[in-house]
Amino acid sequence: MESNLKTNINEEILNIEKIRNDFPILKQLIHNKPLCYLDNAASTQKPQIVIDTINNFYSTTNSNIHRGVHYLSEKSTQAFENARIKVKDFINAKSEKEIIFTSGTTASINLVAQSFGRKYLNEDDEIIVTTMEHHSNIVPWQLLCDEKNANLKVVKINDIGELLLDSLNDLISEKTKLISVMHVSNTLGTINPIKEIIKIAHQNNVPVLLDAAQSIQHIEIDVQELDCDFLAFSGHKIYGPTGIGILYGKENLLDEMPPFMGGGDMISKVTFEETTFNELPFKFEAGTSNIAGAIGLGAAIDYVKSIGIENIKEYETNLLNAATDAVKEIPGIKIIGNAKEKTSVLSFVIDNIHPHDIGTFLDFEGVAIRTGHHCTQPLMDFFKIPATSRASFAFYNTLEEVEQLTIALKKTIEVFN
Ligand code: PLP
C-alpha cells in the first residue's frame, strides 16, 4: 500500500525494512490482510534474536542458577547475572544490587507496597498517585492503605490529559510517605513531567516510584539523572519475554527494606529459631527466577540499544503525529488525550459506535488495536466514558500501517452509519 500521508518522517532515521524482517510475527496475513499490529502498549512483538536467545538457552545451557557447582549451572548463572548487568547499564543504575528481577511491573510495584509500604506506612499516612494511573499502580496502594488505615491521595489532571502539578503541591505534606506515578500514560500517551515531580517530592523528603511500563521502550531513562527512588518496568513491553520485569531501587532504600517473599535463594542462613537474609539483590528474589526470561530481556535490551532509543523516539513521534493528523480529519472521531508531550499512544472514541465494535471490525481489516478501559477505570470516569479504542505504535510500524488504520476506521464508520 502506498502512503499518501505528508509527513516529515525521515526514512534515514531507521531502516524499517530491515527492522521488520527481524520480527517474524509481522509477516503474517490476518483475515487475508497484512497484519497491522497497533497494540504495542499492551505487549510488543519479539525480534528473532530474543526468540533465538531463549531457544538457545533451553537447548544448550538450561540449569538452575546460583546453587550449582556443575558446568551448566555456572553457565546459566553467568548468563542470568550478565542480563542483570545489561539492565543496570541500560537504565544507568549505580550497581547490580539495585536491579531486582520480578515477573513484571505489577509485581515490582506490589513488592514496594508490601516491603517499603509495610515498614514505613503508619495510620493516617498518605501515598500519592494520579488520576491517570494503571490499576497496578492503584490497587497495591489501596490494599496497603486498608491494612494500615492510611490514605490514598490523587493528583488531578486537566481535560487534555496533563497532570496538574499545583494539585501535587497541595497534596504533599509530612504525612506523605511515597509518590507513585506513571512516566507515560498507557491510555493517553501523556509524558508526565517526572523531573519536576521528583524535585517537588525530594524537597519534601518524599521518595518517588516511577512506573516506567510505557516509557522504558520509548524514552531514554537514566535513573541517576532522574534521581527516582524506585522504577518498575516489564520485559514484554520492551520486546522481551513475558513473565519478567524489573524493580530498580536505590541501594540504601532496598537495604533497609524487609524481604517481601520468603523461600530459597533469598536467605543467608535458616534455622527453626531464626533466618538471616541474603544480600541485595537476592534478598528480593525468593525461589527460582524466570532465568530464560531474564536472559531474553537482556537480548531485547541489546537489540533496542543497537537501534538506538533516541532514533526510536524520533521515529515513533513522527508516526504518532502522522496518525494523529490523519485520525483527526475523520468526522465523528474524538481523540482522548491531547497533552503537549505525548508518545506512541492514540486513544479515541467514535460517535455512536462502541469501542469493542470498532476493535472487532478493524480486526477483520488486519488491524490489531485494543479497546476497553485499559486498566484505567478511574481515568475513564474522569472523561465520563466507559472505554476508548487505542492504537499504540512501535518502531516497526510504518506510515502504510497508519494509512491502513485510517482506511479501516473510515470503513467502520461507513458500515455502522
Ligand atoms: N503500568 C502501566 C502504565 C501499564 O501500561 C501496564 C500494562 O499495561 C502495567 C503497569 C502493568 O504491567 P504488567 O501487566 O506487565 O505487570
Image: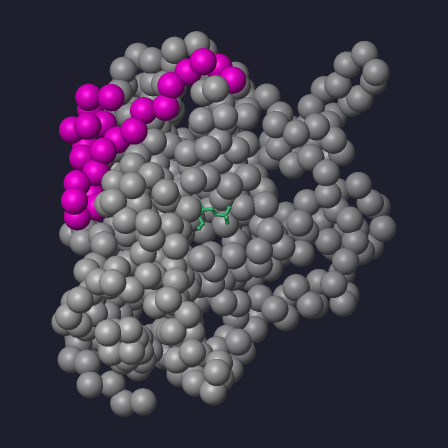
Task: State the residue at coordinates (29%, 78%).
Answer: 415
Q: Quadrant of residue 37?
A: bottom left
Quadrant of the image containing the C terminus = bottom left
- Snapshot colouring: one colour
Residue 396 visible in the current orientation = no
Which stretch is magenta? 147-171
Counting from the top left corner in percent of width and height, residue 401 is at: 33, 78
Q: Is residue 375 or residue 166 the one in the foreground?
A: 375
Number of numbered tags placed on the structure image: 0
Q: Quadrant of residue 3?
A: bottom left
Task: State the residue at coordinates (67%, 56%).
Answer: 292
Q: Is residue 156 magenta?
A: yes
Task: State the residue at coordinates (33%, 53%).
Answer: 387
Where is 177 relative to 380, above or below? above
Counting from the top left corner in percent of width and height, residue 58 is at: 74, 63
Task: State the residue at coordinates (30%, 12%).
Answer: 174
Q: Quadrant of residue 310?
A: bottom left
Q: Is residue 319 magenta?
A: no
Residue 77 visible in the current orientation = yes
The extreme bottom residue here reads: 2
Where is 45 relative to 236, above or below? below
